Amino acid sequence: MTRRLRRNPVPYLLAVAMAANIGSAATITGNPQNILIGSFSQIPYAMFAAHLAPVAGIGLVLTVLLVAWMHPAEFRRAERLDARPAPPHLHGPLAAKTVLVVLLMMVAFFSGQPPAKVAPVGGGFLLLTRVVPSHRIYGEIDWPLLLMFAGLFVVVAGFEKALLTPELIVEIGAIGLDRMPVLAAVTTALSNLVSNVPAVLVFKPFIPHLADPMLGWLRLAMASTLAGNLTILGSVANLIVVERSRGVAEIGFWEYSRAGIPVGLVTMAIGVWMLR
């Protein structure tokens, strides 16, 4: 990652993980749980962004301020972070093609085309290249991470089939998921038990029966995403940052949570207020 770091990299890594989570709330394609919610709810891409992009923007500003406030000695020093990454090797035509494909995909998303169709087409065009050998691309795939995801989906599917009987669904619906604080609290707890993507699958039987299903899906997208900042287990982005930072910094569960809990609770409170 870097050759030499003269300052403590932990606050910067925490900020990266938390910003990745919060920023991903802005659009349907920002994270896996939003993609699922977009598929289940059929909310238009532009409408989703109009409701949640402001939440993400305010959350990012608060995250920067809170992380800097919790590490004052690190961010108030005149000395710059001395990071020396390896010089990049830029393929000009490939970079230009990538930018063009991404722009066309964004136009398609906002014009109402289904993300599930646009994304594979865009990805297919990006894979059509003779500049980078295909084995190098596939070598960058994090297969253990995909295996963990598959295992989580199996566990959630088993939970749904074995425990979510019609009677239990009625009882859970009676706790008041229409109320934003209740939905946010339940989502936060569940997201940090099984991660936020499987948590969304658990909520799938309940949201369509709320008084305003569209608002319910938007609230679920906000709560499941922002809840991912509370602990390392809350989001796959956290696991990726912590794993990739080994050798540069060691971020333990409680070290992450000391920053993640206040950031998660404050941004969640803002999201609850904005989607009330």
Image (cartoon, grey):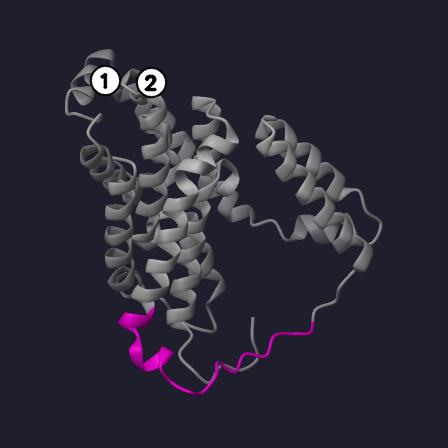
**Residue 226 seen in the figure:** yes
Q: Where is residue 91 drawn, in percent x and y?
A: 79, 60
Mark 2 surroundings: few (<14), some (14-19) or many (≥20) residues within 10 A: some
Q: Please state, as top left, top right, bottom left or bottom right, where the N terminus lies in the image.
A: bottom right
Amino acid type of the residue tagged 1 in the rendering: Ile
Estimate the x, y position of residue 108 in percent, counting from the top left: 64, 32
Please check the rendered image and state whether residue 80 is part of the magenta-colored stretch, yes or no.
yes
Q: Which amino acid lies under the numbered mark 2 shown in the image of this protein? A: Pro
Foreground of the two, 189 or 176: 176
Helix, strand or loop for the magenta stretch, by majority:
loop
- The span shown in magenta is 68-87
Mark 1 secondary-structure assignment: helix
Identify which residue is drawn at 33% across, 46% down. Answer: 226
Q: Quadrant of residue 250?
A: bottom left
Quadrant where the image shows the C terminus: top left
Q: Secondary structure at mark 2?
A: helix
Q: Which residue is mark 2?
A: 208
Residue bearing mark 1: 169
